[in-house]
Image (tube, rainbow, N blue to C red):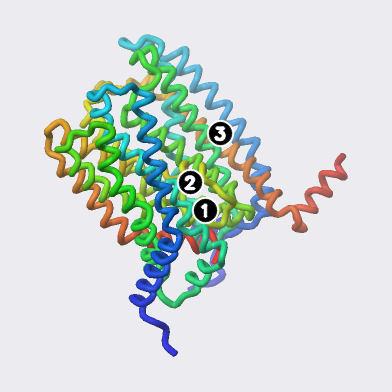
């Protein structure tokens, strides 16, 4: 019996993870709820003046979305480590990087996409000018997959450890700095009426690079962390 | 080819490298060299500080406040050098699974974090009278802060594992990710700064540093390198004993120490 093709493996993992997420679809609301709570706290802390909120709105939405993703990252491999299916993935004849890419895609679809859909609401709450909203959405659409890929790389290193939310944040921060700078740079340039294509292009280039390299690096990290 | 010829320099180097991979050999080697390292550290630090704090002329703009660079700049250099050393050892440990390389990488991390911390503290002490602020979001300062987080991440990941060697390999991999990430962070922060029109204070400006200030600086740089050697060898010795506590050579050392009283 020959092993199923890599394509079959990819589709199977993607379908399995999406199905699992669908069975627990209530959980998809948690990151959105978290982002909503954090975004609500900012006007209380800074005062309700529209002008001030409009100036910081894009940055707040961006950081809130990334923090909500950080909270959800722990769930990427944890259940699979606990029920042993991750070790089966490591033993599978298909390339591990490809199978992990399917897992990362499923994770992005179930955690980042709801956040992306909710972000216009958050932006409106903070009085972000409507004209800038498309730029923010494009920046988020490029930044969140990048965050998922880099986050998967970091979270793969911690699968062998006990629960480590704070450690994850500490490890991810240096990787997030450039993402935040370019995403926020694009939006603030758009807000000032300046050209905003360059930072978005940088984000896109980084995303393409991460799409190719991160799953393979993630596979290497997973093998190290599980000593397999 | 004459097989009986005396060993070449390369052969000696290869032999030395392989001997260093052996824990008992390294333990004895480190014990022999540590006193020399600390002696050389103290002598060069005394010369460098004397030259820097007393002999070097005051700066025409900053007066005596600039003298903090004799601590600050060597520490900043060392924060990067130690990171490179850690990542290099980590790579050797990951590829060839050399136990000693893993230990050296992990024991270098706290020293590098300390150098980074000292750099940040002395920088902000200098920044208060010069810039009027403890902290500015200058590209170099921000990169140094991110470097500190990288070190802390490596240390944290290393200690999160139950198994020391597994933790060392995972943390070494994180250190290698950091090598790729650090230049990206630095250039993105530079870009961010120009976009936001931040402070454009030049640390040294176009004027070149004079010899009377340069030689104490270089002596201090040498001293911090020697300090790294002293600290690293000591830390690695302790880590080796912890890791190899059950082995015969560690037992022999313990018995020898006990018989000595």
Image quadrant assignment for residue B210:
top left
Q: Which mark is residue A198?
A: none
Q: Residues within 10 Å of mark 3 (few under 14, many from 20)?
A: many
Quote the CA–CA distance across marks 1 and 2.
8 Å
Identify the residue under disc 2. A168
Q: Is residue B202 above or below residue B242?
A: above
**Quadrant in the picture for the C terminus of chain A:** bottom right
Asked if both marks, 3 and 2, belong to the same chain, the answer given is no
The residue that appears at 24% across and 48% down in the rendered structure is A203
Q: Residues within 10 Å of mark 2 (few under 14, many from 20)?
A: many
Q: Earlier in the sequence, mark 1 or mark 2?
A: 1
Chain of the residue under label 1? A
Q: Nearer the viewer, residue B194 or A36?
A: A36
Asked if both marks, 3 and 1, belong to the same chain, the answer given is no
Q: Is residue A74 above or below residue A20?
A: above
Identify the residue under disc 1. A158
Q: Position of residue B169 (x, y in %)?
A: 53, 55
Quote the CA–CA distance across marks 3 and 2.
32 Å
Q: Which mark is residue B227?
A: 3
The residue that appears at 44% across and 90% down in the rendered structure is A1
Q: Are marks 1 and 2 in contact (CB under 8 Å)?
A: yes
Left or right, B256 with respect to B80, comes to: right
């Amino acid at each position: 019996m020959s092993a199923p093709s890599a394509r079959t493996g990819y589709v199977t993992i993607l379908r399995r993870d999406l199905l699992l997420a669908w069975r627990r679809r209530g959980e998809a609301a948690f990151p959105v709820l978290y982002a909503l709570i954090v975004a609500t706290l900012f006007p209380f802390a800074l005062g309700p003046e529209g002008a001030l909120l409009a100036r910081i709105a894009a940055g707040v939405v961006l950081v809130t979305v990334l923090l909500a993703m950080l909270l959800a990252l722990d769930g990427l491999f944890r259940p699979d480590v606990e029920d042993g299916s991750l070790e089966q993935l490591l033993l599978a004849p298909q390339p591990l990087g490809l199978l992990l890419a399917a897992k990362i895609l499923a994770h992005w679809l179930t955690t980042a996409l709801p956040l992306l859909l909710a972000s216009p609401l958050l932006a409106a709450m903070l009085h972000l000018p409507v004209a800038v909203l498309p730029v923010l959405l494009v920046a988020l659409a490029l930044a969140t997959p990048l965050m998922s890929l880099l986050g998967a790389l970091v979270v793969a290193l911690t699968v062998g450890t006990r629960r480590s939310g704070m450690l994850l944040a500490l490890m991810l921060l240096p990787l997030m700095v450039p993402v935040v700078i370019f995403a926020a740079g694009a939006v603030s340039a758009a807000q000032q009426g300046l050209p905003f294509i360059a930072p978005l292009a940088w984000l896109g280039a980084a995303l393409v690079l991460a799409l190719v390299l991160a799953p393979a690096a993630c596979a290497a990290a997973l093998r190290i962390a599980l000593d397999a | 080819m004459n097989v009986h010829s005396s060993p070449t320099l390369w052969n000696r180097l290869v032999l030395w490298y392989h001997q260093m991979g052996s824990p008992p050999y390294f333990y004895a080697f480190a014990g022999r060299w540590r006193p020399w390292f600390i002696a050389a550290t103290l002598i060069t630090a005394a010369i460098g500080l004397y030259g820097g704090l007393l002999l070097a002329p005051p700066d025409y703009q900053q007066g005596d406040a600039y003298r903090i660079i004799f601590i600050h700049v060597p520490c900043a250099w060392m924060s990067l050098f130690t990171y490179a050393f850690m990542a290099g050892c980590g790579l050797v440990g990951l590829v060839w699974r050399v136990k000693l390389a893993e230990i050296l990488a992990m024991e270098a991390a706290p020293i590098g974090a300390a150098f980074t911390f000292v750099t940040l503290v002395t920088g902000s002490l200098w920044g208060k009278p010069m810039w009027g602020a403890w902290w500015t979001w200058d590209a170099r300062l921000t990169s140094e802060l991110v470097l500190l987080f990288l070190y802390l991440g490596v240390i944290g990941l290393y200690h999160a594992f139950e198994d020391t060697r597994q933790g060392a390999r995972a943390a070494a991999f994180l250190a290698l990710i950091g090598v790729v990430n650090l230049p990206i962070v630095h250039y993105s922060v530079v870009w961010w700064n120009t976009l936001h029109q931040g402070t454009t204070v030049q640390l040294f400006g176009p004027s070149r540093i004079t010899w009377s200030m340069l030689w104490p600086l270089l002596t201090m740089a040498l001293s911090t390198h020697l300090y790294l050697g002293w600290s690293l060898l000591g830390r690695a010795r302790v880590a080796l004993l912890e890791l190899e506590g059950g082995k015969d050579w560690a037992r022999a050392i313990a018995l020898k120490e006990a018989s000595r009283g």
